[in-house]
Image (spheres, rainbow, N blue to C red):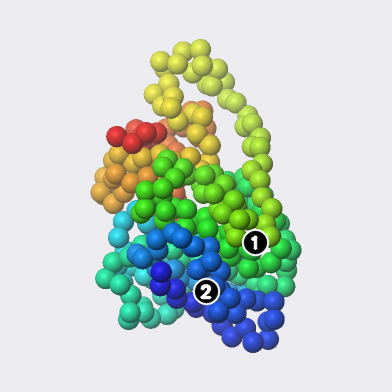
Amino acid sequence: MKIYLYLPDHSNESLFPDRNSIIHILNHVAGETDTTDLVVSVYHFQKSPGHRGTAYVQRWMHPADFATGRGKWAFTRQWPIPPDLPERFKLIRVLISGTGGNYPKSEMDIYGWLFRYQSMQDHLALLFAHELHHFRRHHLGFHPREGEHGANRWALDHVLKHGYSIEGYRRKSRRTRRFPITGILKKFPSADPFPGFRSLEPGAIVHIIHDPKGRYTGQDATVQRRIRSNSKRLVIRTNDAAVWRWPMQWLSVQKK
């Protein structure tokens, strides 16, 4: 595993983990996982939208893909591309924010999981473990058909076993208001062209069977929210962290 850190000077921030601590956390969490093909880049800003990570693991990345000029990771273009990158690799990007002085704290992710971290080190450990799950699933063949909820469950159990201080659980989602068409579809199921999508929760995995531009055909994507009863599109997140309202006739709940 090759690690690249993009951190300002933290000499006056005793609560912020130093470079050696961050490298230790990443290696500690990776543990026995074969990370030969993995590159990890960690970025830090005192003021940023918050912690986040993205795993680019469904296709091979190349040095030109290490940074991007668009989307939520556009800031990665601020730094030159490392000259010692492998010719091809799988990539995990991690963003951490703050000074480390606002812990312990609780946060809820977009999938309805509530986590409480005792320190920034704990936060980084869980964040990386979550993305590592995706790497293990797509590149190493572990955790078949597990999505975001599976990644959270595995990451939480994994970091607890490694001694990090984190609490977490999935909160029960509130039932959304049902529109009259829902009753019609239940009474006449043959009238529903997308019955397999109605029960999908955020974090579920769907398979892209068609993309007019050919970028995502054959890839998995993650459901971002439940569909409305009369909707013909599903909000998904693709492997490059882009969010789309994808026509459901171009998706499959099961791989073909």
Q: Earlier in the sequence, mark 1 or mark 2?
A: 2
Residue 125 position within the rendered picture, expressed as x and y whole percent measured from the top left: 58, 63
Q: Residue at x 56, y 82 (%)?
A: 8
Q: Residues within 10 Å of mark 2 (few under 14, many from 20)?
A: some
Q: Amino acid at mark 1?
A: Tyr
Q: Residue at x 72, y 73 (%)?
A: 101
Front position in the image: 207 or 30: 30
Q: Amino acid at mark 2?
A: Ile
Residue 250 position within the rendered picture, expressed as x and y whole percent measured from the top left: 33, 37
169 with respect to 205 (left or right): right
Q: Quadrant of the C terminus?
A: top left
Asked whether disc 1 touches disc 2, contact meaning CB atoms under 8 Å apart, the reply is: no
On screen, residue 235 above or below 197: below
Which SS class for mark 1? loop
Q: Quadrant of the N terminus?
A: bottom left
Q: Which mark is residue 254?
A: none
Q: Residues within 10 Å of mark 1 (few under 14, many from 20)?
A: many
On screen, residue 221 above or below 107: above
Label 2, on which residue?
Answer: 23
Q: Residue at x 39, y 24 (%)?
A: 193
Q: Which mark is residue 164?
A: 1
**What's the CA distance linking mark 1 and mark 2?**
15 Å
Res. 205 in view:
yes
On screen, residue 59 above or below 102: above
Residue 120 position within the rendered picture, expressed as x and y whole percent measured from the top left: 65, 68
Res. 64 in view:
no
Front position in the image: 200 or 123: 123
